[in-house]
Image (cartoon, helix red, strand yellow):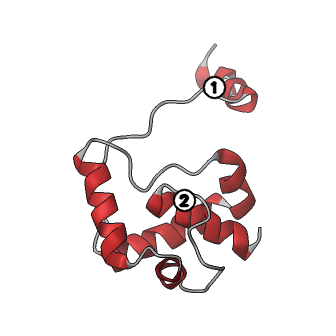
Amino acid sequence: MSDADLAEAVGLALTGRSGVAAEPSSDPLAALAAGGWDAPAIVRHAEAVIDSGGVWPHPVPDELRIRVGSARLFAVLQRAQQDLGLFGRSSTPATPRELTADERRLQAEVPPHHGA
């Protein structure tokens, strides 16, 4: 879990592009602005994606999200959405993906009190 991974994940989620954060920073929006994505550009992009029926913030690949930590990424993205005035904007759900072997195993388990 590095700051560089977090910067990459936030940049990808907010812009849909990889490698846009100039460098890791305690202020992800400032890092994105230094990389050419200021707040108005992110808002325009987000509104265009949402208006076209897409998903914003963009999904972050599992391997990157796992390295960063889902809770940490969610907290940073939620704060960025609030700062951008985009928190609570509805978007279509992410496209379904195949369940992992662990997720399939968990779904197949029946609790002891289930009565089966």
Looking at the rendered structure, the number of numbered marks drawn on it comes to: 2
The percent coordinates of residue 46 (x first, y second) are 33, 59
Instruction: Name the foreground residue: 51 vs 103.
Output: 51
Q: Point out which mark residue 12 bears.
A: 2
Which mark sits nearer the N-terminus, 2 or 1?
2
The percent coordinates of residue 17 (x first, y second) are 52, 57
Q: For numbered disc 1, what is the local secondary structure?
A: helix
Q: Which quadrant holds residue 9? A: bottom right
Q: Residue at x 56, y 68 (%)?
A: 20
For this view, does 83 lie left or right of residue 11?
left
Report crowding for label 1: few under 14, some 14 to 19, many 20 or more residues within 10 A (C-alpha).
few
Measured in 3D between alpha carbons, the distance from the residue under mark 2 to the one under mark 1, in whole angstroms, is 30 Å
Q: Residue at x 69, y 63 (%)?
A: 68
Report crowding for label 2: few under 14, some 14 to 19, many 20 or more residues within 10 A (C-alpha).
many
For this view, does 114 lie left or right of residue 56?
right
Type of amino acid at the residue the image marks with label 1: Gln
Instruction: Name the foreground residue: 15 vs 56.
Output: 15
Instruction: Name the foreground residue: 94 vs 33.
Output: 33
Q: For numbered disc 2, what is the local secondary structure?
A: helix
Q: Is residue 89 visible?
A: no
Q: Residue at x 54, y 85 (%)?
A: 27
For this view, does 15 lie left or right of residue 115?
left
- In which quadrant is the N terminus drawn? bottom right
The percent coordinates of residue 36 (x first, y second) are 47, 76
Instruction: Answer above or below: position of 113 versus 46.
Output: above
Q: Point out which mark residue 107 bears.
A: 1
